[in-house]
Image: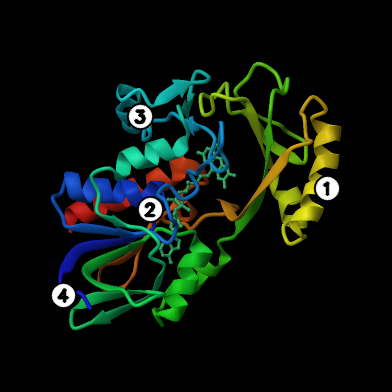
Amino acid sequence: MADKIYDYVIVGAGFSGLHLADHLKNHRNKEVLVLEKSRGVGGRMATRRDGEFTFDHGAQVIENDELMNSSIKRWSDKGLLRPISSDHFSAIGGMTKLAKELAAQLNIELERKVNKISWLDNKWLIEDDQTHSWFAHQVIVTAPVPQILELLERSSIKYPKDLQQIHYAKALVFITKGESSIGESAYREISNSSIFSVSSQKLKGTSSSPCQVVVMGPEWSNTYFDESDEVIMKLGREVLKKELPELLVDDLQLKKWRYAFPLNVYHQDFLALENGLYLAGDGFSESRLNGALKSAKSLMSTLVLC
Ligand SMILES: Cc1cc2nc3c(=O)[nH]c(=O)nc-3n(C[C@H](O)[C@H](O)[C@H](O)COP(=O)(O)OP(=O)(O)OC[C@H]3O[C@@H](n4cnc5c(N)ncnc54)[C@H](O)[C@@H]3O)c2cc1C
């Protein structure tokens, strides 16, 4: 068991967790450790490489707004963004490049799934599902709300029961490789369709070789999520041929997100529980990266006052 006590342990290296860690370390001079269960940073900002193809299989684009403006400027100055409309940007080389830029100066341990947190002798003990453990004065958990609740239940930590009312849409995502004439726009959302969005990874600047990503809508995704991959691909091919006939669907890949977008959100941008334990992320604010950032920034401004 480590005897070092961090000022903050942040659970989750998604957009909200990385923003919080960046702020607390670089602007508040705090000792911060980020624990992430996956092999890489970014959470739902996720990019996969497959030979000559690179594709974002989570978040596709960033919308500029008042809160996002400083991030847009930071990444633009580093040549990481490409404008794709008057108020939307894509990440050159993929969304994880942005997460990696945020993570570069941070203390992050990957492949650490936090399993339990306990208040012990005036500090938090954080344990993963192996044998690792850490101490911190304060803990911020930024996972999707249902995963936060699993952690709190395992840790026997009380929380407001209305958190159980926050539900997420699932997302089934199809990747197609090769040239397809899906139009001139890098990214478009489709209304009144089983499809939520379609994007050209080449026009977005994600991939040098042509490939496309189709995010299926919440209704279609929820209906077929628990079918086998084989069945989902077969049904996917059928629906894509009908609704996007110009798309080549011979070489299809599938990515599944159990918690893609919050369907409803908590009535506060973050939640402070007992003894410096905080909950944040898009489930507390708004769907999308903008919501994750809003939650992180609201929590930051409260921590400044503590
Ligand atoms: C298919 C898809 C398309 C999308 N498209 C867009 C888009 O175009 N534009 C947009 O703005 N938004 C989009 N979004 C939504 C956007 O990606 C999310 O709103 C945002 O990334 C949420 O950030 P977050 O930090 O709140 O959560 P996350 O990114 O989910 O980060 C939480 C992190 O916590 C980690 N974690 C969870 N439990 C534990 C644990 N016990 N221990 C350690 N680590 C843990 C997870 O691995 C994850 O890395 C899309 C999402 C999906 C799935």
Q: Residue furthest top?
A: 184
Q: Left of 113 or right of it: where is 177? A: right
Name the mark on residue 69: 3
Residues packed near mark 2 inside 10 Å, few (<14), some (14 to 19) or many (20 plus): many
Find out whether the residues at labels 2 and 4 contact each other: C-beta distance under 8 Å.
Answer: no
How many marks overall? 4
- Out of 39 and 19, give the one closest to the viewer: 39
> Dot 3: few (<14), some (14–19), or many (≥20) neighbours within 10 Å?
few
SS class of the residue under badge 3? helix
Mark with earlier residue (1, 4): 4
Mark closer to the chain start, 3 or 2: 2
**Residue labelled with disc 1:** 235
Q: Which residue is mark 2?
A: 13
- Disc 4 residue type (three-letter): Asp
Residues under numbered marks 3 and 4 in contact, where contact means CB atoms less than 8 Å apart: no
Mark 2: is the Cβ under 8 angstroms from ligand 1? yes
